[in-house]
Amino acid sequence: MTRPGTAAAPAHPLSRRGVAALAELRAAVAFLTRIPVRGATAGHDRTGAAAFGLVGAAIGLFGAVPLLVLGPHLPLPAAVLALVLVVVTSGGLHLDGLADTADALAAATPDAAERARTDPRAGAAGVAAIALDLLLAASLLAAIATADPRLAGAALVVAAAGSRSAAPIAAWISRSRPRRLRQGLGGWFAARIGRIEVVAVTLTTIAVTALATLASGRALLLLGTVAGLAVASAVAGGVVARRGRLDGDGYGAIVEISFLAVLAGIAVLLPIPVS
């Protein structure tokens, strides 16, 4: 309350920006994880997209713990546990999108594709997509952990950050092609993505990659991430073109494709051990 006859002082611009940034971070946590965040998406007017890269990096840091602790002795179990933590934290949200997209791509006609996508039961293509996705991710992480557990932890952080950042960028690109958008979550998300969100997630990914490269002491982390994201862009573009639209499930597929591509880009650049 203010004293009688006095007006409340206007909030400082920096204070307003801090409140807005915190709200964006809370919305991103609510959107990308199963961590309860009270009132984060009230009114459904905030996506949290600007903070997707930051939240992705946090998820990766959490998942990196088994790689750093068990990686030197048990690289494959450590990789599996790391993925378990990532999936549990995110609630398997993107895996579900990948499965629905795979079922839609496997359908013979557009109508059958839409029925397959909206069916709550996963079809054969969807189950295979999840199984292969997790198998490939675990194998790639284990290969990196065998060479250098610290590099594997850094790779997981960068892959998680870059893959989550890919969703807002894909939404912004697709806004120039309205026919590829649809109503529902995908349309709602894309309508709220602008240059600010794209710049924010891009800078976040660059910063996370640079810090992870310094922490691991391996330049191949940077090179592998760039190569992986380039390949992911091409593959994701092909998936969207094949589907003819970018819906909510498509974003999940893009996240998983980008995650795998970054890990693959880093693993491929590992030096071949000399026997």
Image: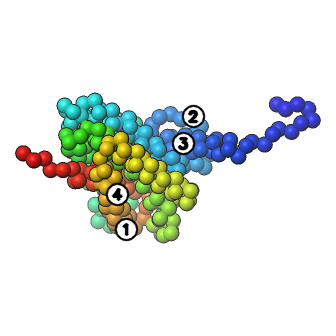
Residue type marked 3: Leu
According to the picture, the residue beneath numbered tag 2 turns out to be 38
Question: Mark 3, mark 1: which one is toward the viewer?
Answer: 3
The x and y percentages for residue 146 are 19, 40
According to the picture, the residue beneath numbered tag 1 turns out to be 241
Residue type marked 2: Arg
> Is 18 in front, or is 132?
18
Residue type marked 1: Ala
Q: Earlier in the sequence, mark 2 or mark 3?
A: 3
Question: Mark 2, mark 4: which one is toward the viewer?
Answer: 4
Residue type marked 4: Val
Between the residue at mark 4 and the residue at mark 1, the CA separation in whole angstroms equals 23 Å
Question: Mark 2, mark 3: which one is toward the viewer?
Answer: 3
According to the picture, the residue beneath numbered tag 4 turns out to be 226
Asked where in the image residue 40 lies, by quadrant, the reply is top right
Asked where in the image residue 193 lies, by quadrant, the reply is bottom right
| 10 Å crowding of disc 4: few (<14), some (14-19), many (20+) | some
Q: Earlier in the sequence, mark 2 or mark 4?
A: 2
According to the picture, the residue beneath numbered tag 3 turns out to be 25
Would residue 17 appear left or right of 113 to someone viewing this image?
right
**Image quadrant containing the N terminus:** top right
Residue sitting at 53 percent across and 35 percent down?
37
Q: Earlier in the sequence, mark 4 or mark 3?
A: 3
* Residue 254 sits above or below residue 91 on the image: below
Helix, strand, or loop for circle 2?
loop
From this viewpoint, is residue 70 visible?
A: yes
Would residue 45 appear left or right of 75 to someone viewing this image?
right
Q: Earlier in the sequence, mark 4 or mark 1?
A: 4
The x and y percentages for residue 207 are 45, 49
